[in-house]
Amino acid sequence: MKGKVKIFFTLILSLVLITTSFSGCNKSSDNKLTKVKLNEVVRSVFYAPMYAAINQGFFKEEGLDIDLSTGQGADKTAQDVLSGNADIGFCGPEQVIYIYNQKRDNYPVLFAQLTQTDGSFLVGRKSEGNFDWSALKGKTIIGGRPGGVPEMALEYVLKSKGLKNGENINLVTNIAFTATAGAFKSGTGDYVALFEPTASMLVKDKAGSIVASIGKSIGNLPYTCFFSTKTYLDKHNDVIEKFTRAIYKGQQWVEKNNDEAVANSIKSFFPGTDIAILAQTTKNYRNIHAFASTPVIKEDDMSRLMDIIQSYQASLIKERPAFKSIVNTEIAKKVTK
């Protein structure tokens, strides 16, 4: 009997030791992950490859644990990075240009892009199969926030089509970004420029029809990019490389998988949103090649962005920074080889 009791306690002790050992291994594994504080400008399906990279485990494969926060404004995202509250920022690169021209010592540097053109769509009140921009003459268009790149891009396209506010069109830019779809639905304007999934939701509600893409009309731009301060990039080059590699994996994954698979991968970031809307939104962005296929930022695209900003208001960029001063392409090129 004593022998059986001894064997029983030996087995219990072995199980405790094994459990403790596994627990210790798990803790050790978790401790190996480097936390990276990432601040995104807003939450949007436009950024699907980033969310896919998180949910498909690509950051963890690189040994990174992403702590994601939302700035609700490019200026807020940039400030979070400059203050050290975020390690990496994600918003329009115009913020980096503006800050560089302030002559700060520890200025932000861009190192990867996620989207490569404007992501807004022109929504009308009826389907226009053979849409022509000349149809906007004499019409009222609800645009975006004055001084924001979506509004700059819209006005750039309108000017290129011979349309100018106050002359042959009427642009409404005094409605809050979150209220433009509601205003259009309530009867304001003939057209409205909207990002997804708002545009597809209006279509679903039979309150409008997507007639054109601003991005398709304007061409490639480094529309939303990742950046860190020069100091962080210098000190944590290895982290930035791992981060960029994970983003590239996300970009490749989205390219190789269908719209429904992408929607299912990112749905946790959009609670309450119809999966069919997420899939349609992904399809719309894919159709205009909004998702960059690689994180490498191109100099010609950056130059085009500065053309658009200066066309809107020259004083916003009094001096164009040299591309190599504000963009590091070495890391993105390395991970895509």
Image (cartoon, rainbow, N blue to C red):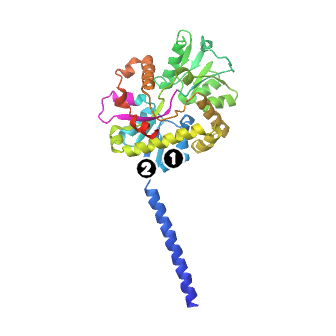
List x then y, in percent, for residue 30. Answer: 46, 57
Q: What numbered label is drawn on residue 130?
A: none
Q: Please provide the residue range marked out in magenta.
A: 96-117
Residue carrying label 1: 58
List x then y, in percent, for residue 49. Answer: 54, 39
Q: Quadrant of residue 191?
A: top right
Q: Residue furthest right?
A: 206
Q: Quadrant of residue 210?
A: top right
Q: Is residue 110 above or below residue 11?
A: above
Nearer to us: label 1 or label 2: 1
List x then y, in percent, for residue 17. Answer: 49, 73
Q: Is residue 152 above or below residue 295?
A: above
| Quadrant the N terminus occupies | bottom right
Q: Quadrant of residue 286?
A: top right
Q: Is residue 112 magenta?
A: yes
Would residue 272 be seen by someone viewing this image from the given angle?
A: no
Q: Residue at x 63, y 42 (%)?
A: 261
Q: Secondary structure at mark 1?
A: helix
List x then y, in percent, for residue 73. Answer: 46, 33
Q: What numbered label is drawn on residue 35?
A: 2
Amino acid type shown at disc 1:
Phe
Along the line of sight, the residue nearer the viewer: 218 or 200: 218
